[in-house]
Amino acid sequence: MSSTNGPLLEIKDLQVHFKVYGGLLKVIDGVDFKVYPGEKVGLVGETGCGKTTTMKSILRILPMPPARVPQGEIIFKGDNILKMRESGLHRLRGKGISMIFQDPTAALNPVFTIGQQLIPIIQHAAGDNERLSRRDIRERAIKPLREVGLADAERLLDAYPVQLSGGMRQRVCIGMALSTDPELLIADEPGTSLDVTIQDQVLRLLRDLVEQKGTSVILITHTLGVVREMTDRVYVMYAGNMVEVAPTRKLFANPMHPYTQGLMAAVPKLTGGGVAAGIPGRLPQYLDPPQGCRFHPRCPHVMAICRRQKPAYYHVEPDHQVACFLYDEQVEIYRQEAVAP
Amino acid sequence: MTEPILIVNDLKKHFVIGHRGLIKREPITVKAIDGINFDVREGETFGLVGESGSGKSTVAYIAVGMYQPTSGTIQFRGQDLFSNGQRPHALKKEIQIVYQDPGSSLNPRRTIQQILELPLRIHQPHKDHIREILHLLEMVELPPDYMYKYPHMLSGGEKQIVAIARALATDPSLIILDEPTSALDVSVQGKVINLLIRLQREFNLSYLFITHDLSLMRNVASRVAIMYLGKIAEVAETAEFFENPQHPYTQMLLSSIPVLSEEEEAIKPAKIVSTGEIPSPVNIPPGCSFHQRCAHVMDICRHVDPAMVQSDSGHLARCHLFEQPPDVANQYQKETATPVPGG
Amino acid sequence: MTQQLQLRQDIASTMTAGQIKQLRRETRRENLGRAWYKFSRNPLSIIGAATVLTIILVAVFAPFIAPYPEHVKPFTDFANASQPPSPAHFFGTDEIGRDIFSRVLFGFRFSLLMGLVVLTLVVPVGVLLGLIAGYFQSTWVDTVIMRTTDIFLAVPPLILAMAIASVLEPNLFNAMIAVSLMWWPWYTRLVYGLARTLRNEYFVSSAEVTGASTAHILFKEILPNCVSPIFTKMSLDMGWVIIIGSMLSFVGLGVQPPRPGLGTMVASGAKYVPDQWWIAVFPALAIVVVVLGFNLLGDGLRDLLAAEGV
């Protein structure tokens, strides 16, 4: 899992703000994140918690006004992506790091054939030096389609996205993203728009492919079940902060952060038992986020210090960290403080 | 035994989506629903499960009056819903629907107050609507200052709650919930579902609950039916459905659900990997529509569509694995001139 | 913020009428503020709005601002004819001695009037037909309305306008009729496309199954979602109508001399270019300014009215 060679991608203390009517949306509030080579990392959080924003900042595809990155570093193989020039980014996108988006129908241009969309990617990957003949390129384009289990790949090159089913489109997107042999793949909710049985197939395929190629994956999702089956390590995100990180099995066996616990309790169980009430309240307004820990207004275990200060990461175990004062050594003292309304 | 509030009898809905050939012009038909029967009892939550193409949403749209059936009937408290063309106003108020996507079920250019006022204005033309609206917001636990907000200012869960309030505005007896929480995060889902449960108790509502999320269905419905390509494959009481699934499709679906705990893994049927795509309702395979993906396929399945048979009290399944009535068996014999297996 | 919400929950149905009015006022104020923010992001939109506002004020108050208001009536002063621009006459005088600046100010009146009248006639009719045809898509209503629209659209617009204007007596009023007859189909077509898509939205189905009348659905559910493209088109159309009106005047079918229509002034001044260039150029520039102002305003309106996304 963790390589002794250090992380492939590391995000250090990233902050992202958006300028809007009324002021500044302080969405990402100091995020740390690491992915090691060959690792599958999950990023879990509800809609609006900032996971897609964080991932888009990695590839720098956020709209730069209104977005701003006042602070932070994103280091990929030793280079800070935030400081790269356009030429470096051009080499990075699609080749070093690839991305799959949530809705494969929206990700594929309906007026071009699959081949017309895949071939430029192959060319980009081959670099500007290699000149490939038309036949060579088509050969190379068929390969990723076969890899994702699409029979009749040759004919598919000339098909339009609308002729394919949802599952096939998602496979095409996966094929396109992996065709350039990237070192890191970012998958944003890859199965959400598909039926359960098809999602199951597609995610299995994704897992098999990345294990075969040794690609690192960041899997973003709000579905805990998918995380459990697909990842080695999980980050839990809330309102622009990472609140917990642990190896997958440990996270599910022993969730530590009150938010993680709330999320797991909220998932209906196949064994019955009713539907839990969910987590009361809603995500904070990023215009005026709560002081201290951003989760404190909704936390069942809130203490006075939670309202004043942001918790640091506590290592409950060497590979299991929580950002919560409940795990501070001085927690008893904190509990004594009167909880002011 | 409580009375049924809704009885669906041999309902069929076929859509003609085009024509084949220049001269003959044969219609291309989508058999979205091809003969289904079920009933919803007063005060219960009846669950309808299925993947895309199963026809479950079409059932909802017909029940609420958006489509006319091709054949078959739906009766609401003994009254045929489709006897006279236009559905009478009184029935429109009794059956309401909450749609799947809160983003498009609320008009983005109208305020919450305007959205909630419409059903009130139609069915209670002369009352003070502002008070009613405030009362509705209170019932669904939304703050009063949401009245003059636009939908885009609300979160997904809140929008869906407004859609529920809108459905409640006409004081209905039956609410059809078409994937009410599929577009929402799991942390909000609980809030919405518990709200629905509370409202059901308070107002003695009946629900037709449609979803593809089997784990959710387990905890919400009292009886469950699963649909595949326009037909019901299996119906049972909830606990029975999940602990003892009979139809191979049900078993396949249950085995694919991602779950969180070991105990849940234990009650899932053994993993059946689904192969191939879901066939589209335009090209329904002959015989049993599931036979191409079925692990237990027999020759009869390729030729004859099974009938729904009772395997236990209240537990029905449509599959050749269970003893079929004689006319079905005879049909197979006629088609293939083979004696029916098992006599 | 969450605490505020908790508190207000229990005063729901005990809210007084006064509190409700207050709530409404506050929300309206906030919506206006947000609208201004969206509009003002682009400085060009503000320039457009300011330009249009200025022109409207100028047109309305022309009799008081113009230094020589009597020059718009029949007037001659051959002693001062064809004078170049000077402090006494900002835009110079024309070939019979009239102050061009004053005439241009009054000229804005005709332009704005043209745009206003045409759009007032065209927009309600065109939009209504588009709504009806779109909602009753694929029925005979749709066919009748849209084929009629197609027929009108098939005729080259300027030629149609000229044909109509020359059959009728040439004056501003008839020019407006001519332009209106060729303009309405564009709105029908625009709204038809929008209405066709919108009728399949779930909020329309919801209104239908609850029993809303067709009128309600057309005007209260579908139309509000068409507002943005309609208003944007209207402000751009102001520019177009003014140009076409000016073109008609230029060929003698619109505003008749001695009235100071901008196009008419360009026509009569055209033969003096390039020696007494100011007689034609200033009215032409005035047309440019009006049209540009409305175009920029249109861009701003589009930003303003764009439906809120996520």
Image: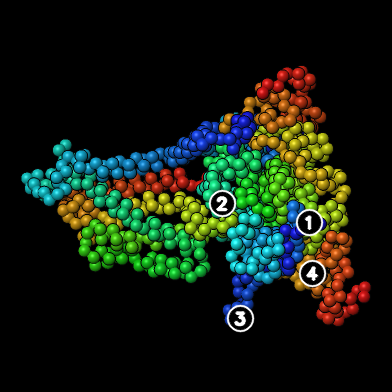
Pointer 3 residue: B24
Task: Identify the disc placed on residue B246.
Answer: none
Residue type at mark 4: give it: Cys
Frontmost of labels 2 and 4 is 2
Frontmost of labels 3 and 2 is 2
At 39% across and 62% down in the image, what residue appears?
A: C185
- Mark 3 falls on what kind of element? loop
For marks 1 and 2, the one nearer the N-term is 1
- Mark 1 falls on what kind of element? loop
Task: Identify the disc placed on residue B2.
Answer: 1
Is C247 left, or right, of A132 in this rendering?
Answer: left
Residue A173 visible in the picture: no
Frontmost of labels 1 and 4 is 1
At 53% across and 51% down in the image, what residue appears?
A: B125
Local packing at callout 1 (Cα closer than 10 Å; few below 14, some 14-19, many 20+) is: few
Q: Position of residue B185 (x, y in %)?
A: 69, 44
Q: Do the CB atoms of the residues marked 4 and 3 lie less than 8 Å apart?
A: no
Q: Quadrant of residue A29?
A: top right
